[in-house]
Image (spheres, grey):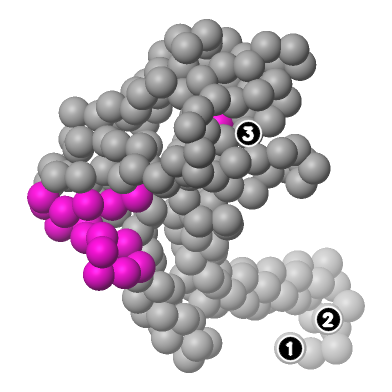
Amino acid sequence: MTAIDAATPLGRHRRTAAALALLAGGALALTACGAGQISQTATQVAAVNGNSADVGDMQLRNVHVVYPTSEEYSITSGGTVELGFTAINSNPAVADELTGITSPEAQVTIVDEAEAGSTEIAPLTALGAGSPADVQLDDPLLPIQLIKVEMADISENVRPGLTLPVTFEFANAGEVVVNVPVDAGHELERSEEAVSEHSGGH
């Protein structure tokens, strides 16, 4: 390009077009490199969050099937897994009670009660099942008692990435059906490693 070309509108237009082309090329390269990282983040959010539902004064939060971390549990057909959730009684004066949990995909049993009547939920308290991380509350001062809930003889539909219907029954609030996701567990970890290896070369 000559000095005259650079000074003319045509010359300036050519330089602008070339600069835009370079910017577009750089953005495309960054998009390709970051695609795996964005996908990884989206997968993490989807995998760790359970489902929620409200019925009457009861609020169900983080309802999910816990991915097995010991030989006691198995995600294979016919196996047994744990159900994780937090049930919050938002009524300031009246207690409620979790009277039953059922699912067409498994036999659900409350197998560990700390004491008689431990499925009763006092006003402004919560009932939780699963690991401590599964039952964390937005309000850490809200009293919570823990139980263990197992799902035995699970069907082939209980798999990471799928959901299954689970019905919660409360003495006062009534019943509600929740579409419960299954934790991805180690499958998510392997997926993250693959994404990390793919994005590491950029």
Residues in magenta? 68-87
- Residue depicted at x 34% and y 27%: 101
Count of residue discs: 3
Mark 1 — residue?
Answer: 1
Residue drawn at the location 75% of the way across and 70% of the way down: 16
Label 1 to label 3: alpha-carbon separation: 74 Å
Along the viewing direction, whichever of 62 and 89 lies nearer the viewer? 89
Locate residue 55, reporting x and y percent.
53, 15
Give the residue at mark 3. Answer: 126
The answer to whether residue 115 is left or right of residue 159 is: right
Q: Which of marks 2 and 1 is nearer the N terminus?
A: 1
56 relative to 100, above or below: above
The amino acid marked with disc number 2 is Ala
Q: Identify residue for label 2.
A: 6
Residue 189 colored in magenta in the image: no
Tell me the amino acid under the disc marked 3: Ala
Q: Which one is in front, 169 or 26?
A: 169
Question: What residue is rendered at 68% in x and 11% in y?
Answer: 94
The amino acid marked with disc number 1 is Met
Examine the structure image and report whether residue 72 is included in the region drawn in magenta.
Answer: yes
Classified by dominant secondary structure, the portion drawn in magenta counts as loop
Residue closest to the eye, 173 or 14: 173
Q: Is residue 39 above or below residue 27?
A: above
Q: What percent of the width, then of the height, locates residue 169?
A: 40, 18
Residue 85, visible in the rendered structure: no
Q: Is label 1 or label 3 in front? A: 3
Q: Which quadrant of the rendered structure holds the N terminus?
A: bottom right
Mark 2 surroundings: few (<14), some (14-19) or many (≥20) residues within 10 A: some
Tag 2 near tag 1, CB within 8 Å: yes
